[in-house]
Image: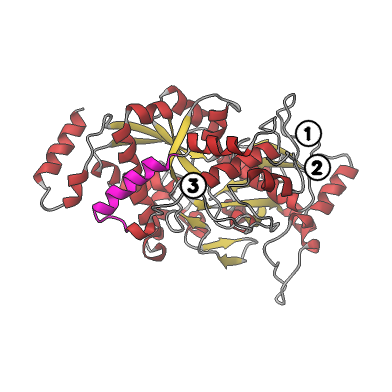
Amino acid sequence: MRIKTILMTAAATVLTSFPALAEMLDVEKDELKLGFIKLTDMAPLAIAYEKGFFEDEGLFVTIEPQANWKVLLDGVIDGTLDGAHMLAGQPLAATIGFGTKAHIVTPFSMDLNGNGITVSNTIWEEMKQYVPKDEAGKPIHPISASALKPIVDRYKDEGKPFNMGMVFPVSTHNYELRYWLASGGIHPGLYTEDNISGQVDADVLLSVTPPPQMPATMEAGTILGYCVGEPWNQAAVFKGIGVPVITDYEIWKNNPEKVFGMTKEFTEKNPNTTIALTKALIRAAEWLDADNNANRAEAVEILSRPEYVGADEEVIANSMTGTFEYEKGDKREIPDFNVFFRYNATYPFYSDAIWYLTQMRRWGQITEAKPAEWYAQVAADVYQPDLYLKAAQMLVDEGLIKAADIPFGTDGYKPATSAFIDGIEYDGKKPLEYLNALTIGNKDNAS
């Protein structure tokens, strides 16, 4: 506890100058190792580290990139990592025992949006004839997967596989890619108890590729397109090898993306440390969105460093600063492509968790029908808004964030929304009705 003692002593000497330090918690564990994957949405971790927000909470943190999502999850489970930037589906899948069995929880949602679907130049050239154009001849967005369907059908007729990449079986990217394909009449395949490839009855064959390897894998012809987070869609544009055809913001406006995950055991053994971590991450997210994204240029420079994302600043800035480039030269304003704090982005809503569970059931990763109560219970077992609100209240009391920016008093469910590419309404309190309204995939009796 040497580091904590030094920090607490330092805090005491400057308490009158920095009143916020009066709220420093007596953390149970002050030296922590956190994991991440090289994506721009790991930004809250990098910013909390670089801006000293972890240190303000009495935490000495090491942040380490991980080879892939499985290695990252295993590290959290075995204690090699104390916590990590995670796919939102990972804590849910682990807790219900899909893949790995472990009780993983999250007190903090890291961001909204941030993904895209890219196809190779060859596929885009074929798609363009099916995409509506505006008066200037530019594609009208959002682009429906129905524009891809004739090409997929041709591949099937010729007996050739149409391969696409996603980053992990329980990733947002898998579900977003499947959602987009299905909305255009393309079957992305099912998981079954006997076949966990996810390719049963598939028109398009989806497989796992680590995010940084997506552009090279597509360039080699192994896959014809992919769904991934930034900067790996924009990297395809800069390399001249592919065209992002749609963002996840266009598939589901302001969809939840990554979370910060820890084992339930860690949070129970280290409650103050958990709150301190959450405080630092909330501050980082607020900094990223402050003053209409005024800090994004600095964030881009930080993320471009090799110890974080390690991509060119220009590539990261292409999406991180409020724009998104589709075809080379077709750069459009998308100010909410990356959201870290506004729209209650950091709050772990139960309804977000339930959406992921509906997609796991839709595509067969959850092999049996479940009652609506089961969805609500799993969400409550994994998403921990009580921890979030404790951290947020402390930050409000310290004058570091505004109470109006935190959803105090919420029941954990967002209002029903139909802001999806297919216009189907989602209500987190009615998961079975939603599941049954979707066109392709498993159906369950509503009860």
Residue 141, placed above or below residue 430 = below
Q: Position of residue 5 (x, y in %)?
A: 16, 32
**Quick check: is 394 in the magenta stretch?**
yes
Residue at the spot of label 3: 349
Q: Residue furthest bottom?
A: 135
Question: At numbered mark 1, what does the secondary structure look like: helix, strand or loop?
Answer: loop
Which mark identifies residue 173?
none
Q: Considering only order in the chain, which callout, 1 or 3, is on the residue closer to the N terminus?
A: 1
Q: Residues within 10 Å of mark 3 (few under 14, many from 20)?
A: many
Q: Main secondary structure of the magenta part?
A: helix
Q: Position of residue 447 (x, y in %)?
A: 68, 40
Q: Residues within 10 Å of mark 1 (few under 14, many from 20)?
A: some
Which mark identifies residue 200?
1
Question: At numbered mark 3, what does the secondary structure look like: helix, strand or loop?
Answer: loop
Direction from residue 133 to residue 393 in the image, left or right: left
Identified by mark 3, the residue type is Phe
The colour scheme is secondary structure
Quadrant for residue 371, please give it. top right
Identified by mark 1, the residue type is Val
Residue at the spot of label 2: 203
Residue 210, placed above or below residue 416 = above
Q: Position of residue 20 (x, y in %)?
A: 20, 50
The quarter of the image holding the N terminus is: top left
Looking at the rendered image, the disc whose residue lies closer to the viewer, 1 or 2, is: 1
Direction from residue 30 to residue 207 in the image, left or right: right
Q: Residue furthest front?
A: 447
Looking at the rendered image, the disc whose residue lies closer to the viewer, 3 or 1, is: 3
What is the magenta range? 384-402
- Verify CB contact (< 8 Å) between mark 3 and mark 1: no
